[in-house]
Image (cartoon, rainbow, N blue to C red):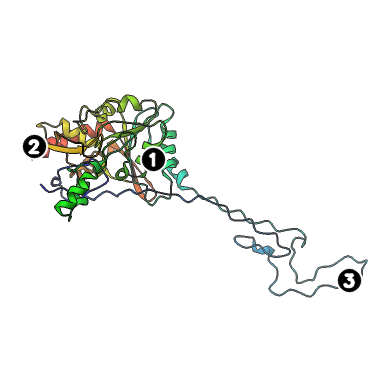
């Protein structure tokens, strides 16, 4: 079965399958994430004081001078000056006029904090986050800090830190090697970097994931293709066990997160990237077929192969749409949907869905 196009989503390699029959429901590819930068806000320079001139902007027009200045009144040196009858009152020329106050504007960071507060993130509960920050104008570290603040000091933030770049069975490799000659592909394969938990980047997972991974004190699981990174007091506990022959099943952090009653936050992305649905694949009866995976570890040229479930995210978007609405809470931030749900509830529902329409499919 041909592999689906690469998405910065759930696993490095999947076997695609057609989405389940669902009239009126369309699937959509998830947004790809790119490093995001945020321009630092800056204050406009304060206007220089101006004598006897009208302010601009939203100033009260009752202080404006007449269109044509009237001739200056004449009076004796010891007389009290009398303003010209056509001149409008105004402050003394020696006193600068006050500048109008700028109207308050909500920043993207403040809007994000408000949205997170409305969603109902449980303090101390582990939080798995998939995110696309492209177009938000917000730096990844600000999003990371907002998530940690909302989770509280006992909360643990977890992100996928997958590395499809070190596998020759992944869609990333197939896309990169397309069109290469046999010799060129061999050279490309030889140059592929091995997985190193402390240093291998996870750029295909997006700017937030890479930010969390590189934060001092972060913990990362050790699977060479489908690792997770986390921050918080339970990160080592939740990510400490990850069998290299088990992508996302019972011997992976997903099982530990399910047991810990984690929540899932989809920040401007859809369920097509929801890695937790893969745990449902391992729990479906009958079990899904298996396949061979290969990746390079330790040093260049040190290739290993192993068998695991033939992972398939091709119908995750549809499964997300079929979830009962009471299982999800939705808001909007920066023009796209933000979704919060309980991991146990959606994984259990996905198991039931898969058992209903994936039975006997290969």
Res 53 quadrant in image: bottom right
Which residue sits at x=83%, y=72%?
Answer: 73
Left or right: 311 as drawn, with respect to 331: left
- Is label 3 or label 1 in front? 1
Q: Which of 310 and 354 is in front in this view?
A: 310
Q: Looking at the rendered structure, which numbered label has been put on residue 252?
A: none
Whether residues under marks 3 and 2 lie with C-beta atoms below 8 angstroms apart, the answer is no
Q: State whether residue 208 appears in this view.
A: yes
Residue 233 placed where, x, y %?
39, 25
Q: Name the residue under label 3.
A: 75
> Earlier along the polypeptide chain: callout 1 or callout 2?
1
Local secondary structure at mark 2? loop
> Earlier along the polypeptide chain: callout 3 or callout 2?
3
Q: State whether residue 26 appears in this view.
A: no
Local secondary structure at mark 3? loop
In the rendered image, the vertical position of residue 320 relative to residue 63, given as above or below: above
Hey, which residue is sitting farthest right in the picture?
Answer: 78
> Earlier along the polypeptide chain: callout 3 or callout 1?
3
Q: Mark 2 points at which residue?
A: 359
In the rendered image, the vertical position of residue 326 relative to residue 74, given as above or below: above
Which residue sits at x=64%, y=60%?
Answer: 60
Residue 330 placed where, x, y %?
33, 42
Q: Mark 1 points at which residue?
A: 211
Res 205 quadrant in image: top left
- Is label 3 or label 2 in front? 2
Left or right: 158 as drawn, with respect to 25: right
Whether residues under marks 3 and 1 lie with C-beta atoms below 8 angstroms apart, the answer is no
- Neighbourhood count class around disc 1 (C-alpha, 10 Å): few under 14, some 14–19, many 20 upward: many
The Cα atoms of the two marked residues, 1 and 2, are separated by: 39 Å
């Amino acid at each position: 079965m041909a592999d689906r196009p690469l998405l910065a989503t759930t696993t490095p390699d999947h076997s695609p399958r057609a989405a389940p029959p669902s009239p009126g429901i369309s699937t959509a590819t998830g947004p790809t994430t790119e490093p995001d930068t945020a321009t630092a806000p800056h204050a406009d320079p304060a206007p220089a004081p101006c004598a006897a001139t009208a302010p601009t902007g939203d100033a009260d027009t009752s202080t404006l001078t007449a269109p044509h200045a009237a001739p200056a009144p004449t009076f004796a040196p010891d007389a009290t000056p009398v303003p010209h009858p056509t001149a409008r009152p105004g402050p003394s020329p020696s006193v600068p006029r006050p500048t109008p106050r700028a109207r308050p504007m909500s920043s993207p960071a403040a809007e994000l904090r408000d949205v997170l507060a409305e969603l109902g993130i449980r303090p101390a509960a582990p939080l798995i986050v998939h995110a696309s920050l492209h177009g938000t104008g917000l730096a990844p570290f600000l999003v990371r800090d907002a998530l940690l603040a909302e989770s509280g000091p006992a909360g643990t933030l977890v992100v996928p830190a997958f590395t499809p770049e070190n596998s020759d069975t992944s869609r990333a490799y197939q896309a990169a090697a397309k069109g290469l000659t046999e010799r060129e592909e061999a050279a490309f394969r030889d140059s592929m970097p091995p997985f190193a938990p402390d240093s291998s980047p996870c750029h295909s997972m997006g700017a937030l994931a890479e930010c969390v991974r590189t934060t001092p004190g972060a913990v990362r699981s050790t699977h060479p293709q489908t690792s997770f990174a986390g921050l918080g007091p339970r990160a080592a506990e939740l990510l400490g066990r990850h069998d290299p022959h088990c992508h996302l099943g019972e011997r992976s952090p997903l099982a530990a997160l399910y047991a810990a009653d984690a929540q899932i936050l989809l920040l401007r992305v859809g369920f097509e990237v929801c890695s937790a649905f893969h745990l449902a694949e391992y729990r479906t009866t009958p079990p899904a077929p298996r396949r061979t995976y290969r990746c390079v570890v330790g040093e260049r040229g040190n290739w290993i192969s192993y068998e695991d479930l033939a992972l398939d995210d091709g119908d995750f978007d549809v499964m997300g749409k079929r979830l009962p609405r009471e299982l999800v809470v939705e808001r909007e931030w920066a023009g796209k949907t933000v979704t919060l749900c309980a991991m146990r509830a959606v994984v259990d529902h996905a198991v039931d869905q898969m058992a209903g329409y994936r039975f006997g499919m290969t």
